[in-house]
Image (cartoon, grey):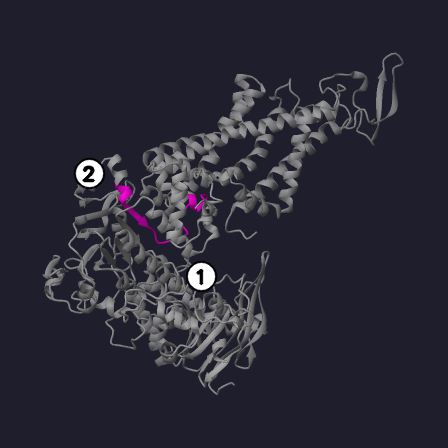
Amino acid sequence: MTERLKGITQKISRPLYSNARLINYYWQRTKRNKLAVFGLAFIIFLVLLAVVGPFFTLDPTLVNFEEKNLPPVGFAIEQSVYNIETDEFTTTKVSGTWKHPLGTDSKGRDMLAMLISGARVSLLVGLIATGIAIILGTIIGVLSAYLGGWADNALMRFTDVMMTFPFFLLLVLIVFIFGPSLAIIVLAIGLTGWTGTARLIRSEGLSLRTREFVTAAKAMGASDNRVVFRHLIPNVISLIIVIATLAIPGVILAEAALSFIGLGDPTVPSWGTILEAGQHSLNTAWWVAVEPGIMIFLTVLAFNFLGDGLRDAFDPKSNI
Amino acid sequence: MKQMHNHRLLQIRNLKKYYPVTAGLFSRHIGDIKAVDGVTFHIVEKEILGLVGESGCGKSTLGKTIPRLEEPTSGEIWYKGADVTKLDKKRLRELRKEVQIIFQDPDASLDPRMTVGDSICEPLVIHDIGDDRERVETVAELMEQVGLEARQANLYPHEFSGGQKQRIGIARALAVNPRLIIADEPVSALDVSIQAQILNLMTDIQEKFGLAYLFIAHDLSVIKHMAHRVAVMYLGKIVELANKKEIFDNALHPYTEALLSAVPSLKSKAKDRILLRGDVPSPLNPPLGCRFHPRCHRVLPICSQEEPDLTEVSEGHLVACHLY
Amino acid sequence: MIMDNTILKVNNLKTYFFTRRGVVKAVDGVNFELRKGECLCLVGESGCGKTVTALSILGLIDSPPGRIVDGQISYNGLDLAQCSLKQLRQIRGSDISIVFQEAQSALNPVLTIGDQIVEQIRLHLPMEHSQARERAMTLLNEMGIPSVERVMSYYPHQLSGGMKQRALIAMSLSCDPKILIADEPTTAVDVTIKAQILNIFRELKAKRQMSLIFITHDLAVVAEIGDRAVIMYGGKDVETAPVSEIIGEPKHPYTSGLIECLPDLSKTTDRLASIPGTTPNPSEMPQGCAFHPRCPKAMAICSQQESTEIIISREHKVSCHLYR
């Protein structure tokens, strides 16, 4: 008897995501999209950089006016220094050194170290703020879809109202009132960015609710609770993953934008704050603005590629 | 086949299910879609009652209303002596153990994110039956009952064919030992050769476990092979109800006659078939009097004025028609 | 051997789909001929390649990933498998027309019925708009559609399933095609509408002397309306014969299996014979004869070699090792 039971697990009620076989199936499908793989590789690289990097680089907050405005390795630039005593400009040619492979900013802080620190910030903000927004959006979306009726109406009108507030201005307002700390920024983005998710999850939930397997579950005697948590939510998880992956770049950009207009957290060097500082010295030290710009660009691109790839992989109708 | 007079498992009396239709800016109630409009019948233990009708006649709605997946608008549903319409949540769950449903579309009725083993086991989990070990054994047994291998329990629905998925649906319905199974067009979406397999399986299971079926279909040939008694529905009402032999050999209602003559058969050639005029009217605005009268080939003047009642014209044979 | 009144001849047609997961041999060597004025039925279950055959005739296969890789389709001196898109377009609709299965999705939801038929007409025939309208209305009338003027201005969603199907048929007839291909036109409709539609096809054949290729999985429909039938399995034709011989003396085990598992009204036994196993996946065809895993009369040679076409009589051909 046990012979034929071999292979069936003991614990029968095991959710999808812990089943390696199905994860592998979706991974195979994602793998075929070269851009998505590039995106994933870049993100992994970024995460490693953010986690391990600080141990190998200089202190990003170390100010050193002697070494200010050094160009990256391989570049040389002419710098003019005004000598107050001789009332003359002395122009020297300054080259990048390996001590500061990506150069320094106007205060002599090492660019590489700052970018890595910025990576940490962007990733953390991205993940946490998106996490908050997604969880909020999913709860509201699923409840709305499942309860229907006046609850659905009320929740959706509330969502509409939230959507009409100009997202960015709202952020500015919150940060202005409560002060520019990273925690406030993360909370602000999370609490205002859930509306799109709620809409998408709700519409998916509505279509799922009428599917026969939901009726089948109810016919078996499943409680509402069970239907929502064991049937609806697992079937929207793939949608949530895609939404999250595509939302993170938006969040990173929002944070960068806030910093760019001066509302970022000045104590923590993020890509946005570096960019902001760098905009004044585009003539003399262009790398200070360009480097964080490139990082933001690549990161946003990477998440978008990965998100698109995941969406195609999860869609049963796309023939990958 | 002689049916012992077992006691009645299910009794439906004057069951109605209306869907309100609203229009206009303020959602004025302008009418109702009378999907099920006063249906009365019963099912006895171990009996297969075939419910046949075309699309829009309300048979699927009826199938869903009996276990209260749709709330009935009015009427009585008695199961084993208890009034289903008045059951509280707890008792309703108990009912859901005894009354199970098999759905039409095998693709849609299984959760694509659960292994089939999990799906079959779900009723056991919901009703808290058995421990883990027992559940695994039950799932294995059920899969073998329906002709699949136990080790396939770890696979996902998309890895099975249509016929196999329908077998899984049947296994799931059997998990908690039901007494009555409502089968809503269980073979309509399957190929002919698979259809035969599934019908044989359902017959075997019915005999083995002593189940009663409410077998809903639009295909009369399928009904002929499965049912003991047959009810014919048209636009929300039952127009004829009799045992199988009577319906197929001695159909009384003109609609039943038309249905029977319309079915293409291997042995038939271009016979003089009764062609009904027009299309099925909308359940929003059913014709006055007998609902079938505009298309009836034996219509009488009274038919447009009065609705006929379902009356017993010979033993066990009921018809709703002014001709009788 | 081409008879004098052969109007279309399909010779060793092979249509493959080249997908990521491998080559899907949807049609793998199909032979048949259509004679003037006859109704030829292509019969088979899902996956046998009948729809792909029909689409191949009109060059409607999605070109990546599908392609006609071999074979000839002879019509009017042309080989449709080889001719240019321009030539195909001229033939489509005016010489050879096709009616699809799902009337719902074959009609454009944002155009009125009238507009769609008129568009079809004016594509091929040099007519004024008003003339085309007249012709469209005549056709709809011929289909038995009531209040033709009004229906011309209806959108598809305002019509019932049966009416939509009839409008589709009217559209396909609008340019007086010599050959009409109907892909499962009665599968998705109710029994009474099915009877009406079969009647329409019968009259078309009689009045217009049209040649019909009727694709279906329902042998009972074949018995009703077909003159000759081609049974398809696994992308090949396995038996070809006049309908009376197919039903009365089926030679191929699949054909006899299909007949036996049909729940037909004329049968009296309750238990259906069934064909074990499932229809093969076109991307994973068994070695040798595609049917051998399910065949009750399989011999050793069947798993190694496919059978060639064996002529039983002038009109009856079979591909089966049993008849060598």
Which quarter of the picture shows residue A153?
Answer: top left
Q: Which residue is mark 2?
A: B86
Instruction: Please name the residue shown 66% across and 37% down the image.
Output: A42
Mark number for residue A175?
none
Q: Which residue type carries mark 2?
A: Lys
The residues tagged by marks 2 and 1 sit, at their Cα atoms, a distance apart of 45 Å
- Between A110 and B183, the one nearer to me in the picture: B183
The secondary structure type at the circle numbered 1 is loop
Q: Which residue type carries mark 1?
A: Thr
Question: Label 2: how many residues lie within 10 Å, few (<14), some (14-19) or many (20+)?
Answer: few
Magenta segment: B95-117
Which quarter of the picture shows residue A99?
Answer: top right
- The chain ID associated with circle 1 is C
Q: Which residue is mark 1?
A: C278
Which quarter of the picture shows residue A222?
Answer: top left
- The chain ID associated with circle 2 is B
